[in-house]
Amino acid sequence: MAPRFVGRLGVADAVTVGNAALGFLAAAVAAVDVAVAAQFVLLAAVLDGVDGVLARRYGGTRAGPYLDSLADVASFGVAPAMLVIALAEDAVVGGLGAVVAFGVPALFVAMAVVRLGLYTAYDATRTTTLGTPSTLAATTLGAAVLAGIESPVAVLAITGMFCYLMVSPIEYPDLLARDALLMGVVHVLAVLIPDFQGGMFPVALLTLSLAYLLLGPWIYWGEAEREGEGKRS
């Protein structure tokens, strides 16, 4: 009596499931250590990129796109929201402050779910997507925390901004493979040695994330090359 997934899921799907597990770990430790939680979120983003590479190399499965979006809800929806709550809840005292401290992260999760559902339905086979990718939103928040930005007001403001951007009509192009590799390397360095040279790698990751967030829809290059790279399927 083998489990149902035996023979139906591939190596890329196994990495996707690992992404989901890291999302749970990030959410679980957020109240204890926000820096460790941020590192788990960034590591989950690395796996999110790796599963796409493996799917293109070894072939995907019918379940792959659905597993990918479900895992992303955990890692780039719930986990970042718990990170924000951990930073904000001790800085507010009842009333409207508590509503904001918990309401903004809750809205972030809701918009991440909407965005990921729309992505799976409409954008998974395209080389562009409408709205800021949830991975980018989570990476920006995680990198900001590791770079020392822990002000509740600042973090809530950034989170609120992403609540809109994730479901906005702004069109983002997929990263080219070489640029995704660069981002992956910086992700890993930010996770492994976050304090190196005064936190240069989290700062670098935050800078790259913000550059793509603000400039990607208008000046990113390589459309012809991107067309030939394909997507996770």
Image (tube, rainbow, N blue to C red):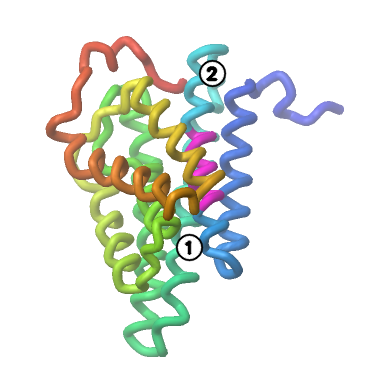
The three-letter amino acid code for the residue at tag 1 is: Leu
Residue under circle 2? Answer: 60
The three-letter amino acid code for the residue at tag 2 is: Gly
Check if residue 128 falls in the magenta segment.
no
Q: Residue 232: give x, y in percent of width and height.
A: 45, 22
* Quadrant in which residue 92 is drawn: bottom left
Residue furthest out toward the left: 218
Q: Is residue 184 left or right of residue 127?
A: right
Q: Residue at x 30, y 40 (%)?
A: 208
Q: Main secondary structure of the magenta part?
A: helix
Q: Quadrant of the N terminus?
A: top right
Q: Residue at x 30, y 68 (%)?
A: 154
Check if residue 40 falls in the magenta segment.
yes
- Please report the bounds of the magenta region as a residue range: 39-48
Q: Which mark is residue 83?
A: 1
Residue furthest out toward the front: 197
Identify the mark nearer the N-term, 1 or 2: 2
- Of the pair 29 and 189, the residue shown nearer to us: 189
